[in-house]
Amino acid sequence: MSAIQKNVEAASEAYSSSFSQGHLALPPAKKYLVLTCMDARIDPAQAFGIRLGDAHVIRNAGASAQDALRSVIISQQLVGTQEIVLVKHTGCGMLTFKNEDAYGLVDKNLGSEAAAELKSRGLDFLPFPQLEDAVKDDVECLKNTKLVPDSVAISGWIYEVETGKTRRVV
Amino acid sequence: MSAIQKNVEAASEAYSSSFSQGHLALPPAKKYLVLTCMDARIDPAQAFGIRLGDAHVIRNAGASAQDALRSVIISQQLVGTQEIVLVKHTGCGMLTFKNEDAYGLVDKNLGSEAAAELKSRGLDFLPFPQLEDAVKDDVECLKNTKLVPDSVAISGWIYEVETGKTRRVV
């Protein structure tokens, strides 16, 4: 067992020994979802004030709305969430590369078979060159798709990894 | 401003006022990623023992490996993570419906234009009928793609929303 796997087991033992939230229902109590980045420096529960059971939390590289659409539709249509809080962050890795860079890395590091698989999947890594614009674009993306009804409130924010602050953009 | 947006602002003020982690670097210090579900009853940091800055955290509906592949490749190729901890959970919403149910809901609730957009995107909601099998299948999915090298350690787990325990499956 790896050190990381041992850490999961130790954390689970400690967490479950004082766990008292086994009664919570599947639907988020506050009927909202938070979409943010996978970045290691973000703790959504603490930074954005999400109590256990209150909200769905979707995380991917860059807090991409396009990449999250499947989960957003499930959250909204099957579980009934009515508000979306989208949070990107300063220092995001998605600001540092382009699709062709990622395709080049896969070819160089993983070889031609991997590069061929990537090409056949037609994967878009969805990097972005400017942070505030990306927040606005992704909020627009969610507002423009017919798959999210107009009744869903959507706000866009930036979390500052340097200060721990979250500020509204749109 | 909605009550949920006010809550984000209040949480941000409290969190940032005692924030002392502004020095953390972009790459996860422990070079691993956790892939888990968006379910509101999971707090990955607490339940799986993830300290701020230690790991990428990817979350989507069902902790789907297929849906997470874009983020996994970025985490591995661009940021250098070397281990994946995949955690699905008891009581998952993905056990409760099939693709045709979700397509039917979109048509009924959002109308024919939305249904047409959904069809044109060819979205697979990736539900699964059995929990342990789904953990094994998703670990296999990550092991079988050439886009994740064999050097990456991958384990599969189930978090119990009733007890707060996380147990290893594969």
Image: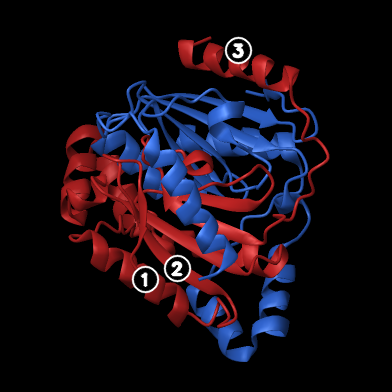
Chain colours: A blue, B red
Locate residue A121 relative to residue B12 in the image: left or right.
Answer: left
Find residue A75 and report its horizontal and vertical position in percent.
33, 38
| Mark earlier in primary sequence (2, 3) | 3
Q: Residue beneath label 1, please?
A: B170
**Which image quadrant is residue B75 in?**
bottom right
| Mark earlier in primary sequence (3, 1) | 3
Badge 1: chain ID: B
Judge depth for marks 3 and 1 and give the one in front.
1
Locate residue B27 relative to residue A36 in the image: left or right.
Answer: right
Q: Residue beneath label 2, please?
A: B155
| Residue at the right extreme, as displayed | B23
Residues at marks 3 and 1, CA–CA distance in whole angstroms? 41 Å
- Identity of the residue drawn at 70% across and 36% down: A133
Badge 2: chain ID: B
Q: Amino acid at mark 1?
A: Val
**Which image quadrant is residue A123 in?**
bottom right
Q: Amino acid at mark 2?
A: Ser
Callouts 2 and 3 close, C-beta under 8 Å: no
**Could you tell me if residue A9 is visible in this image?**
yes
Disc 3 secondary structure class:
helix
Front in this rendered view, residue A19 or B123: A19
Disc 2 secondary structure class:
strand
Residues at marks 2 and 3, CA–CA distance in whole angstroms? 37 Å
Find residue A131 and report its horizontal and vertical position in percent.
73, 39
Q: Residue beneath label 3, please?
A: B10
| Mark earlier in primary sequence (2, 1) | 2
- Identity of the residue drawn at 57% across and 25% down: A48
Alpha-carbon neighbours of circle 3 within 10 Å: few (<14), some, or many (≥20)?
Answer: some
Q: How many marks?
A: 3
- Identity of the residue drawn at 17% across and 50% down: B97
Callouts 2 and 1 close, C-beta under 8 Å: yes
Do badges 2 and 3 share one subunit? yes
